[in-house]
Amino acid sequence: MLPRSGHGDVYPPIDVTIDIGFLGAGFISRTHRFFLRHTPVDHRIVAVHDPDRARARAFAARRGADVLGEAELLDRVDAVFVTAWTSEHERLVAAAADRGVAVFCEKPLAPDAGGAARMVASVEAAGVPNQVGLVLRALPQFVYARHLLADARAGRLMAIAFRDDQFIPVQGYYESTWRIDPARCGRGTLLEHSIHDVDIMRHMAGGAAGPVERVSGVVRELHGHPRIDDLAVARLEFGGGGVATLTSIWHDIVDRPSQRHVEVFAERLQLTLDGTPDGALSWQFAGEERRTLRGRALAEACLDAGLGRRIDLLDVGDGAMFNPLTPFLEAIRDGRPSPLPLREALPAHELVDAIYASADDDGRPRPASGGSPHQSG
């Protein structure tokens, strides 16, 4: 466990191997294990806890870790990955912060923005390094799209059309059924899956588009699971005049992988992107030829523009992305804040709450609290 700094900030740097634990051993934990295998920061996975003991033992066996109770685990580690179902996040993050353990928490942070705000308060009061799993910010397509939209040649943002679809995640591949239990997940596809999309739209638009001022939305429960939307259509209105639309779908096409298709128009720029690690970004400024980049070439363009670090660059299948866990482990090692702390997720949570409030009120527009443009690098 990291020594307390004594001043409510972050912890002092450490020069030893970072001991990591996992609270949750499901699908997303395996994703983080992949990222950890490809970081140069010295670490080891030493403990795991999951209510499913067999799953915890299988996870532990792959890394030589111990299966422990929650309290034992938190007393053993320097950092913990909170990858349990959503309703458990607040309790587990508070327990880790109270013991002085650095925290990486998956999205969504909580079933609603109030819970997310309490989690931010707990890690900030404890002064522990903390990070949220908004992984789309690590994809070169979105990194470079934000760069293009900030170019003076683009002009004002006009429209974003964002479609996100995947098969409903309770069919075995994700090894869970909790995503159709509102007591554990809160709501459905808009919160559980597309909070990524809400975050990346406002992040990609950047400060020039102005804050999100008003939202509206419609949700449906076509699979018949109460309070679990499997279709959400939302509209976000930016202060600069631009409008974004999001269509989020949980369908039954199990042989179709998760897809994100995004089209953006500014006054003098059009871009289209496929939001998967091997997806392409295509763009055209007024009076210029259309360009398309993907995979390693797109990631290299990000590096050339000073938008990322080579140490974070990671090949993923035929694509590439920036490893989100290297900066987190560096923050722990060097005693400084993470570049993507839990606080960064609050605006997206507030927007999602407002969209649901609109949907529950027959789609009437609602003011968007917390929709301010992204402020950090």
Image (cartoon, rainbow, N blue to C red):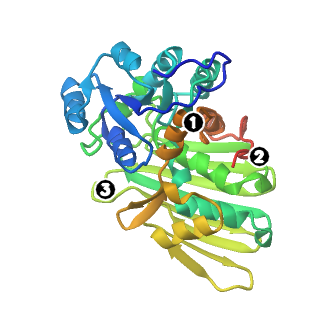
Q: Which mark is residue 253?
A: 3
Q: Which residue is mark 2?
A: 211
Residue at the far front in the pictured view: 15
- Regarding residue 194, the answer to whether it shows in the image is no
Of labels 3 and 1, earlier in sequence is 3
Q: Which residue is mark 1?
A: 334
* Amino acid found under the numbered disc labelled 1: Asp
Tell me where residue 354 appears, x and y as whole percent: 65, 35
Q: Is residue 65 above or below residue 273?
A: above
Badge 1: residue crowd in 10 Å (few <14, some 14–19, many ≥20):
some
Of labels 3 and 2, earlier in sequence is 2
For marks 3 and 2, give the one nearer the viewer: 2
* Amino acid found under the numbered disc labelled 2: Pro
* Amino acid found under the numbered disc labelled 3: Ile
Q: Is residue 132 above or below residue 290?
A: above
Tell me where residue 7 appears, x and y as whole percent: 68, 18
Find the distance from the CA under tag 3 to the CA under tag 1: 45 Å
Q: Is residue 216 above or below residue 96?
A: below
Tell me where residue 154 appears, x and y as whole percent: 76, 70
Find the distance from the CA under tag 3 to the CA under tag 2: 36 Å
Of labels 2 and 1, earlier in sequence is 2
